[in-house]
Image: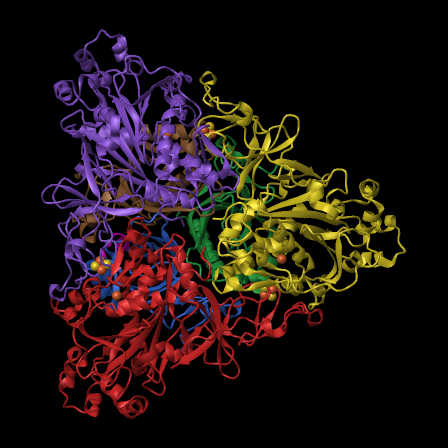
Chain colours: A blue, B red, C purple, D brown, E yellow, F green
């Protein structure tokens, strides 16, 4: 089995990345962008959401494995993931969802993406930033009275286009080894 | 609670009557009834061969994965001799779960509660402070190991059963093996797993997924009609995929074979009877294979299988009771057709819950780059976020909810679309083959085998 | 699991003994026992008439709402002829839920799984690729429709039952209809729903709410004593509302009638016997009516009903098994008294869960502005955030929890406050009328009818 | 049935409202106000909470319906709502809760209102702002070990009084069509 | 559902056979089976004495706490005479929970539903609007009180039982009382609770915790081996604590006695037989005691108990069915050894859930500062965040999950480590005493008593 | 029973403490600190976390009791708490967790600490600040598909060390009277 895809995400001996301070104009613009993004998804405005994805996007949701503490670096697995997409695939997914027969989400779920703990760092590339943020997703379908809840961290890279940002990379570290939903027909 | 020999439910219903053979109906209550579920754990999941994974997941001595046989956790581990063992993950001492992680490598599975230790094959090693013999003397050490399941490795796939004296795995597959071999055994290297399986929970009875895996081709036309809207040109495409040959057996296994000539323009003339195997292979080798592998494949398959593979290869189907398999042809810009395969198991987690486990495979020896392409193609369509299967997993819960209703559970599932065509002409394969438009026969066979197993006192 | 003809529970208890007629007690276990719950689904919810909504919710051809009869989902739809039909929301093919949205409009209910299609009346239309006859030939098309319930529209209220040959709706209401007509049928236009019902989940057995709906007047004094603290002047007000006439029947229906002369200063002399109906109507028309509507109301009611309406109109009560109704008089600054009405159903969702469904009504023809005022008044007091009913919905779960306890379930609910007064003087109405301080008789009748139904093998 | 009350909230062709930027002094003051409000409610300081309500308040919690994607604009229903109140009604509710016999909340629930994704916009009216914010409400009563969780968006209008703000309008879009709690005896 | 007199489960298994006396095994299904759980509520929790708290929690007249006996809520209240009463927290009227808060003070427990009122001793006081006699006349007022349990206060500990005519509390403790007295009754003041107990929920069958409380010393060596890694020097320390004397009885009670000379350097010579009680007491008084208290303790204990206390005092153990007790010695920088005690109960909350309740005690009269020190030491090790017990509470759920598996539930828990040493030399105490390395005997006794109770029809 | 430890936390007649305004540089630095802290715990970086604890730390998690509204001031109980620790005890706990045999957390839970509603106040002591913040903790162990969720308020005091802060005091007010987890082997 391909195991090279596993890696140690928790311990980075590299020099600490430079932070974009909370309260800086750049940070604030990014915060607005993230709140707007959540609203787009929660309000099913898929076209707008696709517009914020970069053409060179990589969008992944690795699996989580239950591993002993000694093997903790193997607890995120990037071989067979829940999502592993490029821009075209995400656009196709969104097109489908907006169509007439994406029954997995028709009727649509009622979702809410609460975004917190946003930290921004410079990357090696001018105008690109790493945005770490926590997400609590709630999802309710039909007459369900116990909402599905999923938490995780989104490890993003975004690109400053001057008047707006675009999402270049997103990796979502979810907090379940067996996902508690019947599908991920919704985007994280 | 029923006794182990019951042939009726406690409300007086004969179990065999749940499947109405005269009208080809199944009472919907089978999707929600707790008593039936408990019986299934004994009579189906306690008796048949169950898929647990693939040898390539645990390549080295001491490697293990934690898996499930029905509602029981098991350890699947490789010993120093390279053999694979399946042991009940329940400590022989006081029932603690011995293995606590999804995978890993160890020669000693040590229970964290009181420290009893077991080998990868389940054998008891000992308990702490040996001189105190904390395991006592009433039970010999040879009986203090983890309970062992019977194991069979088929083309690298790890199957196990609690039915130590029951049918062999080959008997279990029966005539259908002829077709499965075409998928699983055609190359010397065989398939390899691309990573740990996706896992997610669906609030549905396992049989809602299970009966569908027995080659329900028809639902694609409606539930997955987006395929047509997005990729097709007005509805004709999907309808054409409804045609093919479904093969099934008395053991509930099923496969759908699809004509290459109808599916691929370049294979237009494959059915003409005028092209040699070589000619056809060079135009369109089996998925995952390259043209130069013809000899290798010929070594593994009979001429009849070879002919079948080059005309109507099996593409999708299931293995009773809870396995779905799907072969994926992925045409590439460079003209090659990459092939991957997905296998699912639907683990029962209660009368109204199932865990969906999804492995993705590539032929061993595929380049790393091609593997990645195939993997991405596959999870785009199947599994957690798969555009096809996300619709299925939102459907099964509704069926299960219907079956919970007091009136709903009295309704039936119907399998009355009966294939009446003569068997396909010049058909080379064994088992029952149904030609033409997809009908309900293979699914009905699935239920008939379920009925047979459920009617046998444990 | 019990057989369909059981008259004892599986622990040997006679079902009839759960309600102890000699001491007017009911064993608390009825609020938690899973076996009793399952029986109720057959013998109560499978047998009686159930309220599903109001015709004004689906005014146009093709309009539908998705509702529940006991633990079964149903489609309530209007056909082209204007008739309302109730069909089990379970696909005749494989049990998928056919209708997936709370409401909408369609002439074709198409199942998303394999595409079987049904009319608003439940009739089977067909399945995709008609020439393939995927619905087979074993069952005639006429039997492939959704299962139909028997429907009765009463004053716009949609009732349905699975008991196709049982009592008519009028027999079901029995003598009590005389009183219900006064509320539901007094005007030509009748009531209209102001919007989709509120829905929320309460962790309680449905009977905790159901038995209270049979006119438990007494609890208001304690559980709702904030009414007094906030609006009253020291406790006397609430106590005075304890007096009135409770009417009930052998079928468990119940209503509380309250004297207008005691409730409204302006109606002080209504009981004097000296005022004509006209005089009184001009001073205080029925809630939701305007003075000019007297002739219309007189056309719909008998003189006796008219007299009752102008002295002791029914105000609050229930319809067996799971309906509560509450009439609300809302005095306005301009001297008018607006009247609205709320109806609840308590949908069983398991032995310890109920869904509270709350519709709000106004008399048809009420001005938009008045409707809004009435609506806001109503949800201020009733339903999700209603100041009165939020206390009730926090109470029923505790009763249910008590009934889960091994000792608790052996306790009883007592209905020993027995009305001993002579029937009210000059009472014009039929059924059983209990005068004076609110007692337990109507609630006891409710349980006696529950006992009767539960003792009849299905 | 009255259907005029339904409307399409997700798609507004109107020109985009002007945003009060994240990090601006006004935004920051509003943020403080919202955190303080949550604390008032979670600590049962009803008098203080009432003091922040404008006398011309409109407070509503519409229903959510499960509708097909094609009818998504009908998924918020503003006819029969869960709450539809003016200032006087809210004050009366709070008075009751603080009294001796509001048994629905005596003993009181333990609640927590996590407020995130706050976006502020100018309105047509000077000194009034639209505040969109996400709320995750947790609620625990008695010995319950599974907390009730309700998510939603609050669509508010607030008025700047100079030294403080007051709440003029609140509409809470909850994410369940069947509310998973036995009542809304608490305020959202 | 079983009848109250069943001695077999509904699948035909004899209840007594669940515990296999010949091989000292217990079928794992006892940790998950719903039918067994229901029987336990009657035959174990409905029959034995249950710990509910301590008198110091409700020192004043009217003080009450709300607690649980099995799956029933009860009110534990002190009346004006100072007596403590235990009443079922289920209103005699309609089953509402009467007491709604964890603790408080009142002379009148008034039900919020209809206002029936009860005294701290459970007696019925009356219902609102006395002249209307809303409690009726069918049942005398003397029978309208809350159901009363039989209460016994032992050293301040509040025990109660529903078994009104069963064994006395002293009979229940039996010979083991000799040891418990040494812990609970040695001082005049006795223990006092330091605050409300910690409470948290564990997804495990109560017996997973219960059987461990019967002095499972062995698991510490593995599950708690961090103790050694952090405080020990290479493994020898923990192993040494495996030695001692376990005492147990036919009633399933158990205690582990540990040698002071082995545990404390300063007590090195305590076993030499040459030191007087006074000498030893001055060097190492009982935990929680100061040197000057010797006379007081001597007044409460016999010379034999005194000797035992100064050599091998009981330290940890349980009281059947669901109590664990742990004595904690906390050596202080100033040379004193503070002693605290923790008591747990494991409240059954369903076949696979238990509520862990943890009280912390100090000897009355301990200084506030010392109390705080002891309290912090205790919760550092035990309870919610306790470094020792957090491992236990993560273990029991796994055992319970194993027992849910269809194959898993057929496995057994084994108690085959049998003590074969002669009884300890010069042992002063009664009951069964097992010397040497910790074995399974006391736990086995626990199961044998469980078997005895479960086999008796209620 | 010792009852002196109970107190009324909801109503303080004291003069209102002075606020550190949202958006001020100090507030922003604190926000960064809190987001970083959450990441440390969620990523099991216990050594780093211990480094942010002051040597004079007091760390407590009181119990919550269900009490009538009239006794609401008794609903937080500070006698027998879930945690009552000093620096040394917390360090020992962290050492254990990082070791080889803390089976309560080996394999480790997947946790997420969403931090919101952060309010900062001056204290009487120069350079020390009171930080009130809401926490939503999610926790998933093994194959659990329903995440354990715990909400609460952390009432902290932190000390400014110039280049970083340290935690001097933390009291976590959790929102359950019966904790819905089998242990608090994780830190709040
Ligand atoms: S349970 Fe495994 S060693 Fe005891
Ligand atoms: S289940 Fe409805 S069409 Fe097949
Ligand atoms: S239930 Fe307690 S007074 Fe009626
Ligand atoms: Fe499908
Ligand atoms: Fe009420
Ligand atoms: Fe332990």
Residue B244 as seen in the image, left or right of residue B401: left
Q: Is residue C8 magenta?
A: no
Q: Quadrant of residue A82?
A: bottom left
Q: Nearer the viewer, residue A82 or C149?
A: C149
The residue lying at 18 percent from left, 24 percent from top is C186
Q: If the image is split into quadrants, where does the N terminus of chain A sit?
A: bottom left
Please state the extent of the stretch shown in magenta in the rendering: A39-45
> How many numbered markers are drawn?
0
The quadrant where ligand 4 appears is: bottom left
Extreme left residue here? Answer: C81
Name the image quarter holding residue C440.
top left
Instruction: Identify which residue, E284 or B28, lies in the foreground.
Output: B28
- In the displayed structure, E139 sits above or below C88; it is above
In the picture as drawn, the residue positioned furthest to the right comes out as: E274
Q: Residue D182 placed where, x, y %?
A: 38, 39
* Image quarter in which the C terminus of chain A is found: bottom left
Q: Is residue A48 above or below residue C189?
A: below
Image height check: is D35 above or below B279? above
Instruction: List x then y, in percent, for residue A128.
Output: 32, 66
What is the x, y in percent for residue E203? 51, 54
Foreground of the two, C140 or E181? C140
Outermost residue to the top: C274
Residue C235 visible:
yes
Residue C151 spot, x, y in % from top left: 20, 40
Looking at the image, residue E26 sits to the left or right of residue E329; the answer is: left
Query: Does the magenta segment cover residue A42?
Result: yes
Residue D42 visible? The answer is no
């Amino acid at each position: 089995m391909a195991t090279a895809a596993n890696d140690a995400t928790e311990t980075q001996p590299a020099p600490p990345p430079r932070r974009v301070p909370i309260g800086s104009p750049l940070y604030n613009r990014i915060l607005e962008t993230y709140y707007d993004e959540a609203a787009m998804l929660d309000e099913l405005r898929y076209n707008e959401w696709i517009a914020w994805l970069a053409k060179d996007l990589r969008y992944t949701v690795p699996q989580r494995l239950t591993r002993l503490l000694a093997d903790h670096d193997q607890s995120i697995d990037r071989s067979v993931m829940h999502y592993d997409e490029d821009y075209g695939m995400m656009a196709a997914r969104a097109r489908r969802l907006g169509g007439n027969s994406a029954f997995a989400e028709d009727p649509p779920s009622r979702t809410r993406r609460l975004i917190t703990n946003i930290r921004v760092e410079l990357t090696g590339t001018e105008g690109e930033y790493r945005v770490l943020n926590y997400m609590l997703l709630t999802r309710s379908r039909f007459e369900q009275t116990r909402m599905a809840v999923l938490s995780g961290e989104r490890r993003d890279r975004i690109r400053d286009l001057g008047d707006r940002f675009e999402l270049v990379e997103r990796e979502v570290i979810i907090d379940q080894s067996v996902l508690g939903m019947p599908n991920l027909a919704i985007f994280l | 609670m029923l006794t182990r020999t019951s042939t009726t439910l406690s409300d007086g219903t004969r179990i065999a009557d749940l499947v109405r053979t005269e009208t080809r109906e199944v009472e919907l209550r089978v999707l929600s009834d707790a008593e039936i579920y408990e019986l299934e754990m004994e009579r189906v999941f306690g008796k048949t061969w169950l898929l647990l994974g693939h040898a390539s997941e645990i390549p080295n001595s001491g490697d293990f994965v934690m898996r499930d046989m029905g509602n029981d956790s098991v350890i699947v581990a490789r010993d120093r001799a390279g053999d694979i063992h399946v042991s009940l993950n329940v400590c022989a001492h006081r029932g603690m779960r011995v293995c606590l992680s999804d995978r890993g490598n160890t020669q000693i599975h040590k229970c964290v509660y009181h420290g009893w230790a077991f080998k990868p094959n389940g054998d008891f090693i000992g308990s702490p402070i040996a001189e105190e013999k904390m395991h006592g003397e009433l039970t010999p050490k040879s009986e203090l190991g983890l309970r062992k399941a019977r194991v069979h490795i088929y083309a690298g796939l790890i199957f196990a059963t609690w039915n130590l004296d029951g049918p062999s795995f080959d008997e279990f597959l029966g005539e259908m093996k002829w077709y499965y071999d075409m998928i699983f055994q055609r190359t010397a290297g065989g398939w390899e797993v691309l990573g740990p399986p996706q896992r997610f929970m669906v609030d549905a009875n396992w049989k809602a997924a299970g009966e569908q895996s027995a080659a329900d081709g028809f639902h694609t036309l409606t539930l997955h009609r987006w395929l047509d809207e997005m990729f097709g040109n007005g509805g004709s495409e999907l309808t054409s995929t409804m045609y093919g040959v479904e093969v099934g057996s008395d053991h509930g296994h099923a496969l759908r074979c699809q004509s290459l000539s109808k599916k691929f323009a370049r294979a237009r003339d494959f059915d003409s009877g005028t092209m040699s195997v070589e000619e056809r292979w060079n135009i369109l080798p089996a998925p995952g294979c390259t043209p130069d592998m013809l000899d290798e494949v010929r070594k593994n398959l009979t001429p009849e299988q070879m002919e079948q593979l080059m005309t109507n290869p099996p593409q999708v189907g299931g293995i009773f009771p809870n396995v779905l398999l799907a072969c994926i042809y992925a045409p590439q810009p460079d003209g090659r057709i990459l092939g991957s395969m997905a296998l699912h198991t639907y683990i029962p987690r209660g009368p109204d819950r199932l865990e969906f486990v999804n492995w993705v495979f590539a032929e061993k020896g595929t380049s790393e780059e091609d593997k990645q392409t195939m993997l991405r193609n596959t999870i785009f369509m199947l599994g957690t976020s798969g555009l096809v299967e996300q619709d299925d997993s939102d459907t099964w819960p509704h069926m299960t909810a219907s079956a919970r209703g007091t009136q709903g559970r009295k309704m039936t599932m119907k399998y009355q679309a009966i294939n009446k065509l003569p068997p396909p002409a010049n058909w080379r394969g064994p088992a029952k083959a149904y030609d033409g438009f997809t009908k309900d026969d293979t699914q009905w066979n699935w239920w008939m085998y379920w009925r047979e197993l459920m009617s046998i006192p444990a």
